[in-house]
Image (spheres, rainbow, N blue to C red):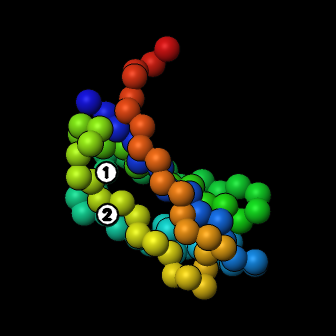
């Protein structure tokens, strides 16, 4: 089974580049099969990791960013892959 974990945070005013750099520097152990990082308007940062694991498996996730970088706590979602199509 394949599961994707999504982590999304909004940076504090003017702190988008710092939040993005912080998110990119975070390591996960073990490493996911795949990891992508995205940015969006309003200094939002999104990280998606893919795992070969059960939906409810205990998997490493990105931590809470430093309080001074984030406008709010990050949102987290977990999705089960249903394949293509």
- Residue 12's quadrant in the figure? bottom right
Secondary structure category for the residue under label 2:
loop
> What separation in Å lies between label 1 and label 2 (alpha carbons)?
7 Å
Taking depth in this image into account, of 55 and 31 the one nearest to the observer is 55
Instruction: Please give left or right for residue 51 compared with residue 69 in the image.
Output: left
Quadrant occupied by the N terminus = top left
Q: Residue at the top extreme?
A: 85
Residue 32: image tag: 1
Question: Where 13 falls versus 82 (above or below)?
Answer: below
Residue, x 53% and y 57% (percent of image)?
75
Question: Where 3 falls versus 28 (above or below)?
Answer: above
Secondary structure category for the residue under label 1:
loop
Q: Is residue 11 visible?
A: yes
Residue, x 34% and y 38% (percent of image)?
3
- Point out residue 50 in the picture as x, y percentages from the top left corner: 37, 43
| Residue placed under numbered mark 2 in the picture | 28
Residue 47: image tag: none
Question: Where 60 falls versus 12 (above or below)?
Answer: above
- Point out residue 78 in the picture as x, y percentages from the top left corner: 41, 44
Q: Is residue 17 visible?
A: no
Residue, x 38% and y 33% (percent of image)?
80
Question: Where 9 falls versus 3 (above or below)?
Answer: below
Residue, x 49% and y 67% (percent of image)?
24
Instruction: Please give left or right for residue 10 compared with residue 8 in the image.
Output: right
């Amino acid at each position: 089974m394949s599961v994707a974990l999504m982590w999304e945070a909004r940076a504090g005013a003017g702190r988008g580049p710092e939040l993005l750099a912080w998110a990119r520097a975070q390591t996960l152990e073990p490493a996911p099969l795949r990891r992508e990082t995205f940015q969006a308007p309003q200094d939002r940062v999104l990280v998606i990791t893919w795992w070969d694991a059960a939906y409810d498996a205990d998997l490493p996730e990105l931590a809470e960013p430093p309080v001074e970088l984030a406008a709010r706590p990050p949102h987290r979602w977990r999705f089960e892959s249903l394949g293509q199509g």
